[in-house]
Amino acid sequence: MSSQPVVLITGTSSGIGLAVAVAAARAGWRSVATMRDTARAARLVEAAEAAGVVDRVEVRQLDVTDAKQVADCLGAVVADHGRLDAVINNAGAGHLGTVELEPVEAIRSVMEVNFFGVVQVSRAAMPHLRASGGRLITVTSVGGVVGQPFNEAYCAAKFAVEGFMEALAPVAATVGVGVSVVEPGAVASDFVANVGVDPEAALAAAGPYAAALGAYLARTRSQFANAAQSPDEAAQRIVEALTADKPAFRLQTSGSARQFVGLKLADLDGAAVQTVTGGWVG
């Protein structure tokens, strides 16, 4: 059995997941850093070496949309280390589009990665976390609280994750498992680039939505250029949820994220949110 607590993290090839894997190792955890394509592990290994924790980070292959892989991976971790103390659901993919202009299959694909992937990992993890009295932490987004223009499918998936975890938390607590969600705002990482949108092509295909999309893209570029926090800053809040005696159910990674989420949670009739997000497209 490992003498260190063991945390499995999904989606660690870049961005927040990479930073969390290193930060957790620095906090004394054994980081099992999973990713769909382990050929992309070089950046993580380099970061772990630079932080002096490469001996506490191990890379494993995991596609969260593959139920068998999920079960096999978590089972192998427990077999190898004798324990699993925490799981951090971080894997996900951004998406830009609006319902009139894209097939339903594209929306289903977003749900598969961002929602059902979380469900599958959480389901497989629960027996092991029950045994350890562990923690289940999920990285959602401010987009899991506030619906945002041209992010319909992505926000739907993140809303689903937030509702799933909010409902699971009191049930999991009865068997000794703590559940938290962590909500980043804008983070300077590869996440936006990985959405894979060519702005000019998107605008050319947007038809009656071109003006609104142009306004949204301009606002988003400005937000990420001027107000984004670093992945390391976001990771520190996630590690707080991992290590605190009694972490909150819902945490944000920055002051701007707290302010944005707070707008929604205090907005009983929806008018405040619609005023803000309406300004992004008009």
Image: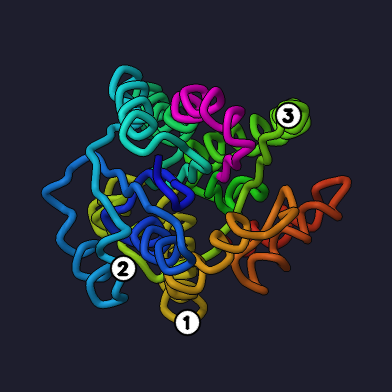
Q: Is residue 1 left or right of residue 196?
A: right
Q: Residue 51 in the image: state x and y as whole percent.
A: 31, 76
Q: Nearer the viewer, mark 3 or mark 1?
A: 3
The picture quadrant where one finds residue 95 is: top left
Q: Residues within 10 Å of mark 2 (few under 14, many from 20)?
A: many
- Identify the residue shown where x is 73% and y is 68%: 259
Q: Residue 120 in the image: state x and y as whole percent.
A: 45, 24
The foreground one among 242 and 252 is 242
In space, the residues marked 3 and 2 are separated at their CA atoms by 36 Å
- The numbered mark, 1 or 2, whose residue comes first in the sequence reads 2
Q: Is residue 84 left or right of residue 174?
A: left
Mark count: 3
State whether residue 96 appears in this view: no
In space, the residues marked 1 and 2 are separated at their CA atoms by 31 Å
- The numbered mark, 3 or 1, whose residue comes first in the sequence reads 3
Q: Residue 204 in the image: state x and y as whole percent.
A: 27, 51
The foreground one among 28 and 160 is 28
Q: Which mark is residue 174?
A: none
For the N terminus, the image quarter is top left
Q: Amino acid at mark 2?
A: Val
Residue segment shown in magenta = 119-137
- The numbered mark, 3 or 2, whose residue comes first in the sequence reads 2
- Identify the residue shown where x is 71% and y is 55%: 247
Q: Amino acid at mark 3?
A: Ala
The picture quadrant where one finds residue 192 is: bottom left
Q: Secondary structure at mark 1?
A: helix
Q: Which mark is residue 53?
A: 2
Q: Residues within 10 Å of mark 1 (few under 14, many from 20)?
A: few
- Identify the residue shown where x is 36% and y is 31%: 102
Q: Is residue 242 left or right of residue 263?
A: left
Q: Secondary structure at mark 3?
A: helix
Q: Which mark is residue 226?
A: 1
